Image: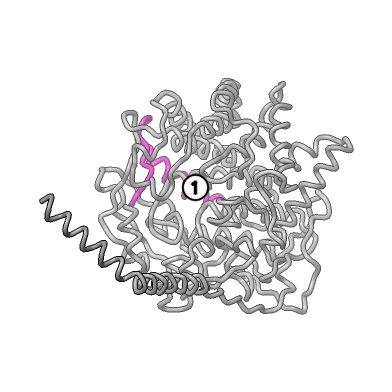
């Protein structure tokens, strides 16, 4: 079922807020709809045979695709997820998305249950982890990408015409990738906790842990390097900036999944070795350091617990105050220069995700006035970002597709668009299919969003965009006592992108013309002197030749 989420204006309500940490007896239907739609979006990203094991795909415009993936290497790599609005499979953002989704499920499981989305969550996670285990055929081999970037990016059309061949790229002991092996280990370990604790599937959880152990051992013992040095085609799309954070991240999740303290020792050693303390950047698929601060605060019970709490609170205090790397737009969206320019909704979601978890699982254990004040500050920040993303902004735009008439209409997504002209993404001008639940890249620093399919920074969708957002929606299902902001919003036309000013060009041409005229006048009045100089040059030339 799809929830369009366009609620009658007769149901006007104040902006959503979380009044307490008591789980509501009945979930708000609007947040239930968004949570459902986010899982629907992940279903729209599926590759492989869609109808299987008695399940029928909910996406009528998606078809079986990528059915020859892996044939070039003799490994079945069908299935899994397409990364964004194209048809490439990238393991690094997929693994990160599964880790974050699993973490969100562990923290906000009741939200999925209240919304009756637990079965869809199980299917979403398993669709990804089943593929990962196929992509890990032996202890020291991991397939990390399917499809060639420049070939796929020159195709724009439905999933029935994906260009072939689609080469598969791997890392192994001779061509390692510390970062991606560690992140994949983290994803399997995190997902195993959900299957063991909430789905009651210990056998499947054990399989996930076995693969996670092998992958982390591979990362830990092979030569340390970024994976794009072994898989050069990934460099243009998902190049990793380092692997120290993933080594710590993977060890922490394996410790949580196995209860083995040896992984904690490894985590601390790598944290110190790679000097990961005191960072101020946001978390994303490339850098998990802020996530390490929060996760370690949950996992450690010894003296290291306070150390990581200090790291987490230093980072979070900087975020919510906008006093370090981050700042705020005029309308209140958290903004990190560089990162937010590429997709502004991503830092807003990841920062809110971490602040929410830390507030709920760490600060809630302390009754001191200082802890409670900090908890209130973090929760206020979280709610402000959620409200902004769901319509409390100058554009009156919820930045998730399909919930309101002001939702983005033109996500950068080939399948949803329905066009076939890679040279003109505005043909047809409107998307033929609604990409329900997809979080788009979002507005610029001036809080402006133009809803242009060709502007991938604003209109791109991706697996990792939705992962923290989905967790936040499970939180809202549990705790929200009123509607999201978009419920009360009227239709609001999009702003028109300002045309580039020609003033600079005109000024430049004017100055150039003036210089030419001045030079011409000067040459005219000095023509006799120039003639004499030129004759002398010719005379000397004849003498010395």
Q: Is residue 60 visible?
A: no
Residue 242 appears left or right of 319 = left
Q: How many numbered marks are there?
A: 1
Look at the image and give the residue range highlighted in magenta.
Answer: 122-147
* Magenta stretch contains residue 489: no
* Magenta stretch contains residue 131: yes
Q: Quadrant of residue 343?
A: bottom right
Residue 66 appears left or right of 372 = left
| 536 is higher (above) or lower (below) than 211 | below
Which x, y percent locates residue 268?
Answer: 60, 24
**Quarter placement of the N terminus:** bottom right
State the residue in front, 300 or 194.
300
Q: Which residue is farthest left?
A: 545
Which residue is identified by label 1?
126
Residue 484 appears left or right of 500 = right
Q: Secondary structure at mark 1?
A: helix
Which x, y percent locates residue 218?
Answer: 41, 28
Instruction: Give the residue displayed 51% in from the left and 67% down from the top.
Output: 411
State the residue in front, 367 or 425.
425
State the residue in front, 387 or 481.
387
Q: How is the image coloured?
A: one colour
Q: Quadrant of residue 48?
A: bottom left
Which x, y percent locates residue 60?
Answer: 45, 69
| 48 is higher (above) or lower (below) than 362 | below
Residue 460 appears left or right of 89 = right
Instruction: Give the residue displayed 42% in from the left and 28% down from the top.
Output: 224
State the residue in front, 545 or 56.
545
Q: Which residue is farthest right?
A: 369
Which x, y percent locates residue 11?
Answer: 77, 75
Instruction: Give the residue displayed 81% in from the left and 68% down from the top.
Output: 14
Q: Residues within 10 Å of mark 1 (few under 14, many from 20)?
A: some
Q: Is residue 522 visible?
A: yes
């Amino acid at each position: 079922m799809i929830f369009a989420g366009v609620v009658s204006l007769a149901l006007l309500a104040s902006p959503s807020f979380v009044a307490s940490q008591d789980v509501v007896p009945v979930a708000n239907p609007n947040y239930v709809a968004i949570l459902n739609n986010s899982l629907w979006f992940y279903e729209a990203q599926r590759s492989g045979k869609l109808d299987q094991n008695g399940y029928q795909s909910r996406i009528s415009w998606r078809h079986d695709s990528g059915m020859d993936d892996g044939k070039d290497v003799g490994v079945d790599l069908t299935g899994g997820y397409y990364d964004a609005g194209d048809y490439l499979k990238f393991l690094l953002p997929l693994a990160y998305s599964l880790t974050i989704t699993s973490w969100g499920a562990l923290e906000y499981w009741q939200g999925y249950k209240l919304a009756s989305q637990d079965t869809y969550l199980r299917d979403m996670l398993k669709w990804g982890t089943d593929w990962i285990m196929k992509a890990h055929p032996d202890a020291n081999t991991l397939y990390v990408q399917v499809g060639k970037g420049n070939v796929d990016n020159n195709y724009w059309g439905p999933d029935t015409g994906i260009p072939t061949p689609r080469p598969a790229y791997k890392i192994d002991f001779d061509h390692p990738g510390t970062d991606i092996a560690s992140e994949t280990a983290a994803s399997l370990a995190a997902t195993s906790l959900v299957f063991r604790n909430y789905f009651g599937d210990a056998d499947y959880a054990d399989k996930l842990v076995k693969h996670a152990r092998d992958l982390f051992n591979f990362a830990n013992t092979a030569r340390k390097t970024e994976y794009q040095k072994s898989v050069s085609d990934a460099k243009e799309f998902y190049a990793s900036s380092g692997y120290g954070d993933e080594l710590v991240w993977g060890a922490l999740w394996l410790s949580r999944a196995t209860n083995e303290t040896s992984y904690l020792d490894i985590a601390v050693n790598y944290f110190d070795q790679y000097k990961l303390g005191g960072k101020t950047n946001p978390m994303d698929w490339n850098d998990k350091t802020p996530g390490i601060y929060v996760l370690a605060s949950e996992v450690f019970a010894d003296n290291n617990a306070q150390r990581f709490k200090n790291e987490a609170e230093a980072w979070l205090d900087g975020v919510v105050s906008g006093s370090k790397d981050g700042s705020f737009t005029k309308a209140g969206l958290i903004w990190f220069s560089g990162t937010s320019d590429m997709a502004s909704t991503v830092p807003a979601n990841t920062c809110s995700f971490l602040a929410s978890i830390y507030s709920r699982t760490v600060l809630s254990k302390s009754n001191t006035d200082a802890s409670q004040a900090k908890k209130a500050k973090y929760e206020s920040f979280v709610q402000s970002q959620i409200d902004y993303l769901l319509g409390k902004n100058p554009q009156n735009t919820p930045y998730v597709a399909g919930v309101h008439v002001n939702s983005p209409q033109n996500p950068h997504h080939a399948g949803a668009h329905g066009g076939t002209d890679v040279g003109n993404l505005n043909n047809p001008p409107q998307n033929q299919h609604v990409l329900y639940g997809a979080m788009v890249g979002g507005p610029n620093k001036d809080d402006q969003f133009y809803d242009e399919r060709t502007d991938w920074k604003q209109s791109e969708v991706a697996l990792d965009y939705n992962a923290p957002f989905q967790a936040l929606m499970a939180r809202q299902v549990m705790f929200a006592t009123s509607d999201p902001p978009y419920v009360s919003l009227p239709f609001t036309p999009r702003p028109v992108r300002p045309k580039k000013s020609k003033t600079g060009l005109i000024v430049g041409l004017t100055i150039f013309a003036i210089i030419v005229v001045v030079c011409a006048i000067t040459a005219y009045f000095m023509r006799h002197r120039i003639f004499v100089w030129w004759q002398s040059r010719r005379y000397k030339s004849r003498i010395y030749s």
